[in-house]
Image: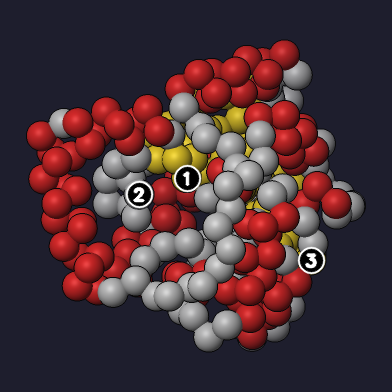
């Protein structure tokens, strides 16, 4: 994973910024962010018999609500991020792992795995495939893995070129300006992958080669970046 992005999240978590900002969203998306867990739950078909792992769980904005649905829940992220997550937990209902996923060993299998708003922080396509292969190695037979909130530049360009997109963008710029953007003062990360339709198709081809079915899924427009991001669900029949 890009070391700059990984450490940036650690610095954010060690600051006094709001949990929504730490997750890479704007404060004016706070209400929209609360809709994410329901969308994830439906796509993963999450239930009380499931063991859930969220890779890149942040401070728990998605994982904590989902933990009330899943039979057991686990999360992995930067040590500073996990520290902020632990502050929000009343007990040990979520098992926490600390570290960069590619450098961290996790024992066991999980029936549902979530990777949300993470893969665009990886360095290149090879690292994305390495990341996914390692995650799939933790997926139980008959389980499902959701790669969520993928920023697709082709999807974004198509939306912004539409009449709806132009109206949205103008309103968005006004809203963000009035809401104010926190001065995060973090190093710019230029060593990250850019997703488009071709990259996503190659990822799906790779999943097929390693024995998994997959489906690209749109996001509800009410989600924080619902117009320009999509999800990818992967599974293998038991």
Residues at discs 2 and 1 in contact (Cβ within 8 Å): yes
How packed mark 3 is, by other alpha carbons closer than 10 Å (few <14, some 14-19, many 20 or more), is: some
Q: Which mark is residue 149?
A: 1
CA separation, marks 3 and 2?
A: 27 Å
Q: Secondary structure at mark 3?
A: strand
Q: Residue at x 45, y 70 (%)?
A: 20
Q: Nearer the viewer, residue 33 or 10?
A: 10
- Taking the image as shown, residue 138 lies to the left or right of residue 71, namely right
Q: Which mark is residue 98?
A: 3
Whether 185 is drawn above or below 41: the answer is below
Percent position (x, y) of residue 10? 66, 70
When asked about the image quadrant of residue 205, the answer is: top right
How packed mark 2 is, by other alpha carbons closer than 10 Å (few <14, some 14-19, many 20 or more), is: some
Q: Which mark is residue 225?
A: 2
Q: Quadrant of the C terminus?
A: top right
CA separation, marks 1 and 3?
A: 22 Å
Residues at discs 3 and 2 in contact (Cβ within 8 Å): no
Residue 43 visible in the picture: no
């Amino acid at each position: 994973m890009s070391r700059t992005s990984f450490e940036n999240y650690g610095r954010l978590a060690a600051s006094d910024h709001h949990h929504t900002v730490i997750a890479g969203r704007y404060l004016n998306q706070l209400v929209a962010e609360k809709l994410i867990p329901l969308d994830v739950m439906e796509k993963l078909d999450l239930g009380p018999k499931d063991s859930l792992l969220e890779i890149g769980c942040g401070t728990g904005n998605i994982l904590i609500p989902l933990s009330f649905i899943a039979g057991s829940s686990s999360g992995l992220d930067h040590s500073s991020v996990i520290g902020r997550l632990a502050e929000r937990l009343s007990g040990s209902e979520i098992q926490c792992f600390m570290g960069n996923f590619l450098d961290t060993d996790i024992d066991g299998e999980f029936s549902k795995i979530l990777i949300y708003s993470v893969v665009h922080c990886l360095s290149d396509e090879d690292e994305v495939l390495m990341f996914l292969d390692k995650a799939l190695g933790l997926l139980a037979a008959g389980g499902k893995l959701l790669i969520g909130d993928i920023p697709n530049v082709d999807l974004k360009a198509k939306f912004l070129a539409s009449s709806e997109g132009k109206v949205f963008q103008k309103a968005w710029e006004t809203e963000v300006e009035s809401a104010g953007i926190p001065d995060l003062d973090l190093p710019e990360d230029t060593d990250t992958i850019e997703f488009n339709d071709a990259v996503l198709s190659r990822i799906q081809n790779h999943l097929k080669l390693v024995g998994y079915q997959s489906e690209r899924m749109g996001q509800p427009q009410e989600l924080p970046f619902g117009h320009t991001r999509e999800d990818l669900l992967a599974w293998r029949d038991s």
